[in-house]
Amino acid sequence: MSLFIERASLFILFLSVIFAALAQGVVDAWSVAALECLGGLLILLWAGKIFVDSKIEITLPKLIFPILAFFFLGLLHCLAFAGSDGAVVSLSSDVEATRKTVFLFFFLLFELFIGVQLFHSKKRLLLLTNFLVIYGLAMAMFALIQHFTWNGKFYWIKPNKLGVSPFGPFVSHNHFAGYMEMLIPLSLAMMLKRQATREARLFYGFAGLVMSVAAIASLSRGGLLSLCALVCFLAIGKWSLSRFSQERESRRSDSLAMTKHGNVPAVRRGRSLQARQIVPKFIKGALVAAAVLVALFVAFVWVGPDRVTNRLTSGKIVSANQQDETFYSSRGWIWQDSWDMIKANPLFGVGIGAYETTFPIYTKTNGAIIVGQTHNDYLQVLADAGIIGAVIAGWFIVLAMREIWRGIKRRDATLSAIALGSGAGVFAIFIHSIFDFNLQLPSNILLFFLLVVMVAQSAAIEVVRDRKMMTGGNQLQQLPASSAKAIRLPI
């Protein structure tokens, strides 16, 4: 029964990811309610598992604590008191908007929590990786088909009344690009994985190529920059991984040779063995990297160099309705007015989710344009949660980069590749967040949380080989490292 509940939870979690993207990123009230219902169903399933198992087992990676701190800050913003004059006193400028945002964030946070509990082994992490790669491939193919057969309607049925530059199921091409850039590095990292079969490399490479084509075709400037950033991250991570692997093999070769031939010959034999291995590995890695760059160049040419160049240089969106979009006209004036808001509310901000209500007070425009986000997730944190929220965000970024580095250094090739791919996705969204508000969209937050789970668990799960002891054979065990603490409470 417990296993059935876990499988049902996996199904609901995967369904939530798919639904959130297909529902245009969850921007309508009905889609928000539906996503919250799926989260509530996960809560019921987890409660049922506790009842069946008669115990509570909770794994809490370090990465989850900054997110919990931000949630509790949101709860603090939800508090409101009536003063003696009848006026409402609260840290939030719009308590109702804050409560709605924090309520949705609670369900997203719980899905992160459930993900940590479900993906507790290498087998489960590989399942999640393959699901995201196949899902990303399907999403990219759908987006490209809809793009080249665009009739002004989502899914060729629903009229577009929400955005000027939609792509795929998303209202904004920037959000689609942000979604893809979190999925692309997973396929590329698995393609670069040590000991990967030729068939696996071909599949992962094809998936990564199609998703890259879709991201480039979206013509998102932040997405294109983030795509370059994630490729650089993968290259540096792969080089570091090869260096660690060579050092381990060198030490192992020296140890074996020392055992057989004595101290002095051992060093020479170990180093000669290492030298013979480095050249083929270097050539192989260079060929794979060259193949990735050629594939991206082919995608760039196929989409159209003029379209991409015009988008990057002049800000012109090449579509049926072309428009010029300079930095100041699209984001600069929002950033400037948001900075005035931040200076007026430095410590706690205006309240999580209250930005849209408060912005007209500080803008220098006539207020005719409704602005719901800063188009910069870092400024958004400062505006919504002040310096305290910024400190929490900085805490999370530092922990995330440290856990990514720990995961990349795993001895197990699969865990290392998963850490590299998910870490590159997290890094890419960090870069894209400078220019857009991907992490304000529920669908993108949910996918980001899954990447956080993969980063945390790939760094925490370690495959160790037992020595031949009582059983007389080799066995594989998976043990949690110090980055994740398991709490078991019998009930």
Image (spheres, rainbow, N blue to C red):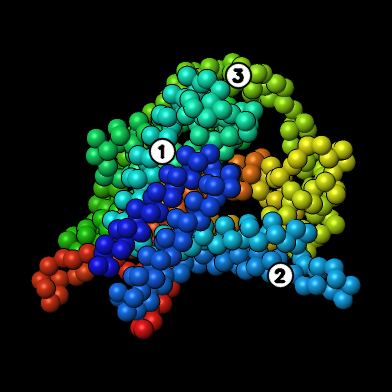
> Disc 2 vs disc 1: Cβ atoms closer than 8 Å?
no
What residue is shown with label 3? 319
- Secondary structure beneath dot 1 equals helix
Give the left or right position of residue 448, taking residue 74 as reference.
left
What residue is shown with label 1? 136
- Secondary structure beneath dot 2 equals loop
Residue 433 occupies quadrant: top right
Q: Residue at x 42, y 29 (%)?
A: 142
> Disc 2 vs disc 3: Cβ atoms closer than 8 Å?
no
Q: Quadrant of the C terminus?
A: bottom left
Amino acid carrying label 2: it is Leu
Determine whether 357 is above or below 312 in the image.
below
Q: Residue at x 69, y 42 (%)?
A: 375
What residue is shown with label 2? 79
Specify few, some or many for label 1: CA neighbours under 10 Å numbering under 14, 14-19, or 20 or more. Answer: many
Give the left or right position of residue 301, taking residue 129 as reference.
right
Q: Quadrant of the N terminus?
A: bottom left
Residue 51 placed where, x, y %?
34, 75
Q: Earlier in the sequence, mark 1 or mark 3?
A: 1
**CA–CA distance in space, label 2 to label 3:** 46 Å
Q: Earlier in the sequence, mark 2 or mark 3?
A: 2
Residue 12 placed where, x, y %?
38, 54
Determine whether 21 is above or below 155 in the image.
below
- Secondary structure beneath dot 3 equals loop
Query: Number of marks in the image?
Result: 3
Q: Residue at x 36, y 62 (%)?
A: 118
147, 255: nearer the viewer: 147
**CA–CA distance in space, label 2 to label 1:** 40 Å
Residue 295 occupies quadrant: top left
